[in-house]
Amino acid sequence: MLIVDFDRFLMGFSLGVHIPLASIGIALPVIILIAEYLGIRYADKNYKVMARRLAIVLVVLFGIGTASGMLVALNILLLWPKFMQLVAQVAILPFYLETFAFFMETIFLGIYIYSWNKFRNPYMHVLAGVPIAIGGFLSGGLITMVNAFMNTPVGFNIPNYIATGMLTNVDPLAVFNSPTAVIELLHVLSTSCFAAVFIFLAYMAFMLLKAQDEQKRTYYKRGLILLICLAIIFTLFALVTGIVSIATLVSVQPEKYAAIEGNINPQAFAPERIGGIPINNTLQYYIAIPYLQSILATGSPSGSVPGLSSYPQSTWPPLIVHLMFDIMVGTGFLVAGILALFVILQLLKKNPLDNAKMLRLLIVAGALAVIILEVGWVMAELGRQPWIIYNVMLVSDAANYSTSIVPITGAIFLFYLFVIPFTFIILRRIFKDRPLENELNSQ
Amino acid sequence: MNILYLINYLILSVFATLFIVEVGIALLSLLKYRNYRDEIRKFLLPIWEVNGTFAAFYLVNFEVTYPTLLNAVGQLYVAPLLIAAIFFILRSIFLVYSEYMNSPQKENLYMDIYALSTLALTLIAISVFDSGISGIGVSLQANLADFLVLLFNPFNVLMLIGVFLIAIFVVSSCFKVGRMHEFGILPLALAFVLMGIAIWAYLPLVFANLAANAYLLAFPAILGIIAAIMQRNMSRYANHLTLFWLFVSINVFGAIEYPYVFGDINILNYVAAPAISSAILWISTIGGGLLIIALSYLIYLSYLKRENASY
């Protein structure tokens, strides 16, 4: 294993830990604020208690998320110093603005947590929490813009940089308008919220299955109703933005598109390939749905789609991304199907909240949503390989080759293996010490 | 003085001021957590996350301000900074875990882990900072670093002890710890002596411009003495003045060291190009202004209107 592979592993692993936490950091304030609003508006103690209990989860996960985010920020600088040197001169402004958005989240989280009983008008407390949600969305969106820059670099004279290594015609504002900035931002935010909402949906479903007395069951049912509504919204957003972002790749990252679709050769009337096994840089044993790929990518069955053979083999992304894409989409449809089933049962007045099988399916959907989030990110990043900045800088050219990275990678890996389960144990202990019925009765 | 350097150093000095108070609290927590639990939590809980955010803020501002220095920094400090990151995560999670523990034993244990992590983090962060200004333990030309030399050179050891002594002085002023307020001037005086020896012994590797800027040292010296006297007399404003003294001292340190890093390298050679610097200035000014307003409101709510908080 080369040092650059340790760099890759550490970066990927750190992001793999941070991304679900960051997703929760984006979506959870929205859930809390809606719950608190509903609690005040309808004088519903269930929603009031829910807001308070979820706020504890937010504080704990925010603390860990801040720390894991700091590790990611350091990793970007320390593992890829040449990349960061370029980004800092061309595309750093979203990162810089993000620190202020992050401050907004942090400061207003402090204000929100320490001011539950300090406003005469209770809606003012909800209002004090709104900047946390805004800060979360801004943070996620601004960081995504730098990722969009990595996929579709802008803001400097690229041919001159490749030829001479000199940065000329720098436009630091161009990063906000890179070809994939808007669609990537919308897709990342919607999928982050989608995954986070399903995590809490699964939690509520699990607790409802366990709950015996009616008071607790009412609480968890209220939570599920709120989360199902949000899940429908974010699933639809994720689906639409996902289709548009794949179609966008055809023009802006054709190699990534070709690898994701398993296209070795460019072709018209392209079928959608599902599954298959990558053998010797070709895809075999797949299921083909005629014309579907051309229709989805171009809007016409005769539309032409790119293939990997148009590019040097040295810059092909690994074909495994095709399988990852299939896992992501297939699992996504499964989760959407579970959600649709819930809605249909509700419309048929079959009381899905009292249906143990339906609740178990929601728990499965929660686990699958996290898989979708993680696989989606891995696919997106692997699909850009071997570039760290598409067509500008190779991962191997940006990497730090210090041998000290090897033991530290092991240490951080082991450290997270301890921290992640321990955090869940702590959260469980926190709520064990604060029985739900006590909090409901104290309202 | 270059405006981008000034902004970057001001961020560092606010962060360092808050963090040195946290170091003092970590020391106090390790020694006498039960005795000062309420005071410690009153300060720490609203501000610890802000401290963490300031660390990220400084990191990104550093990247924005000195883009062409980043490759060297990444190559030289990868090991200590990644280890520091582990301690940073430990610090954050165990503090937040302790916040919601009902069992006093568990709370004590988690606060001890928090405190030890904070001290270890401080040790590495100050060592990297000392190496960054003096160049001891690293070779910019060869892109090589010797972690052991970086940690255990006399300059760093003396500076580290000095910082920990200052943290004791600050925390004894803020929390009126036992009879420590009566002797607060001792750690402060000792810190001055040790740091003075370290700087004197390593001139002109550090403080190359000391001769021209020596008068600046009068500010922290006078303020420090007044703060120590006020602390001894239990003045209610001693803690405010102590924090102000700390902030001023860190800034004076930066002003005398300016513009050198790694011993004799002029940092202005690495400052961001004009194409991006005006955008940085605008964002820093507007964002910084909003940040001050929001922080002030947080402090007002956390310290001045705290009595009814239930979570």
Image: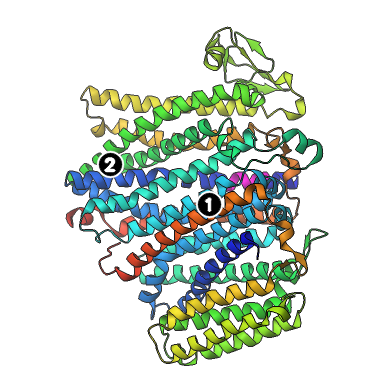
Spot occupied by residue B97 in the image (x, y as percentages of width and height): 42, 61
In this rendering, which labeled residue sits more in front, label 2 or label 1?
Answer: 1
Spot occupied by residue A429 in the image (x, y as percentages of width and height): 36, 58
Name the image quarter holding residue A235: top left
Name the image quarter holding residue A143: top right
Chief secondary structure of the magenta portion:
helix
Disc 2 secondary structure class: helix
Q: Mark 2 points at which residue?
A: A223
Q: Mark 1 points at which residue?
A: B283
Which amino acid lies under the numbered mark 1 shown in the image of this protein?
Answer: Ile
Residue drawn at the location 54% of the way across and 52% of the way down: B282
Task: Tell me which segment is drawn in magenta.
Answer: A8-14
Which amino acid lies under the numbered mark 2 shown in the image of this protein?
Answer: Gly
Q: Disc 1: which chain?
A: B
Q: Nearer the viewer, residue A415 or A259?
A: A259
Q: Nearer the viewer, residue A211 or B274?
A: B274
Q: Can residue A417 be seen in this view?
A: no
Name the image quarter holding residue A346: top left
Residue drawn at the location 65% of the way across and 38% of the way down: A155
